[in-house]
Image: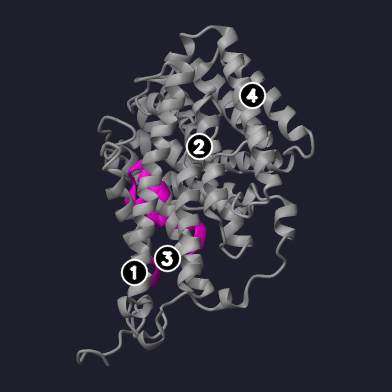
Amino acid sequence: MALGLPISHQPNVPGRGIVAGYGPRFWGLVVAIGVASGVAAGAFVQLLDLVERVAWSHDAGRLADAVRATSPIHHVAVLALGGLLAGAGIVALAHRARPGAVEISESLWLRSARLTIPGSLARGTLSVVTIGLGSSLGREAAPQLAGAAVASRAADRVGLPAWQRRLLVACGAGAGMAAVYDVPLGGALFALEVLLGTITLPLVLPALATALVATATAWLILPDRPTYAVPSYGTSASLLTWALVAGPVAGLAAVLWVRIVARAAALRPQGRGRVAVPAAVFAALGAVAITYPQILGNGRDIVALGTVGGLSVGLLAVLLVLKPLATAACLGSGAPGGLFTPTLAFGVLLGGLLGHAWTAVWPGAPAGAFALVGGAAVLAAAMQAPLTAVVLMLELTRNADGLIVPMLLAVTAATVVARLLQAPSIYAARLTDTAAERQCTVEAEWDRPPVPEPAGAAR
């Protein structure tokens, strides 16, 4: 009994104490990892802006407009260069045998949560440069790798047990996401719901602390503003009914997308093809971008336009096919990068297209509202993380709370459909069988419940 108070019977509150259960060194690492993640996120965003400015003369506004202003030869040449850099970079990382040059999910779930800082920073830098040149993958992978690698190295230096190292690596990845998108709560939930698969008070506090420190640190470099500026949408009977109907459709679309991701990951080239294939794929992407420049980059422009009703029905339909294919092609070529924004863009395109069809029967709801709800639903089902998806949509826009009820309806229905079909998440889908075979057993220490140890045993 502490301070004369009885031990709590609340399931998520251990009687041993939360703060004391970790120890000062653990909390010092939480702060240090948060600062490192914030600095890394700011640096990677600055690098991305620099590459886009040099490659496409993109200073402000939409990337697609800057790409459209260049010549067709410039399209193909820049993308071919991006493919060559991606292939050569992956080969160089493989030759140096850096264990840190892997995906976050692979390292956390299959490699005892161990990453090296040089390998992770090299892979992150490569992903940012190629995305700036036009790769259709997400930018969040770079700061996530940086935050997770710092956490892994720091935990090993201090000598923390395996379960605390695993917790800190997940927190570092979540902090990187929080900092790059200015989503502290969403980043914390990503670490908990997606990477660790559990949400309990002893885990929530380190995740929240790391994410908020990273976000605040990034404010020293990046502006504190919503990623997507959307108007304030309200709920209507039409939108609520549509959410019930569209939710299962979004779930099916997410399952299809996850299977495409899995297939693309399995087709990643080996041997000499690791350089030739990315160059050819990226050059072809540049050729398609002559007509549809919106397919280049992570999809931020698509989300920005779709959530305010700025895309025509015809463009919605075309991009609904081309954008996921472009992302899958880049992933299948072996190029590094994330899947968060490309997945969100796919959901926004689907929601916008279904919304246009719905308003022909029951008009009244704005096109952007359908896109926002559809984006959240596909994201939730594809990540297998309904809470994270909803919170991310609220933080990314800071103005979508009026859609919370239809969003929850669609997210729940989509996630249920994905679970009934036993689909993995996009992060599990990109793990190849070869990666899974590299570690057949998980450390015995990981089987222990990840809760704080008694204060006397804390490190």
Q: CA distance from mark 3 to mark 2?
A: 26 Å
Residue 141, position as x, y percentages in the image? 50, 44
Residue stretch in magenta = 176-203
Pointer 2 local density, CA inside 10 Å: few below 14, some 14–19, many at least 20: many
Discs 1/4, front: 1
Where disc 4 sits, the SS reads helix
- The quadrant of the rendering that contains the C terminus is bottom left
Q: Earlier in the sequence, mark 3 or mark 1?
A: 1
Residue 290 showing in the rendered view: no
Who's the residue at 45% across and 46% down the image? 143
Q: Is residue 269 above or below residue 173?
A: above
Q: CA distance from mark 2 to mark 4?
A: 15 Å
Looking at the rendered structure, which numbered label has been put on residue 138?
2
Q: Earlier in the sequence, mark 2 or mark 4?
A: 2
Q: Earlier in the sequence, mark 3 or mark 2?
A: 2
Where disc 2 sits, the SS reads loop
Viewer-side residue, 197 vs 164:
164
Q: Residue furthest top?
A: 71
Viewer-side residue, 285 vs 160:
160
Looking at the rendered structure, which numbered label has been put on residue 199?
3
Q: CA distance from mark 2 to mark 1?
A: 30 Å
Looking at the rendered structure, which numbered label has been put on residue 38?
none
Discs 4/3, front: 4
Q: Earlier in the sequence, mark 4 or mark 3?
A: 3
Q: CA distance from mark 3 to mark 1?
A: 19 Å
Please indicate whether residue 167 sits to the left or right of residue 235 in the image.
right
Q: Which residue is mark 1?
A: 27
Q: Which residue is mark 4?
A: 282
Discs 2/1, front: 1
Q: Is residue 59 above or below residue 250?
A: above
Colour mode of the rendering: one colour
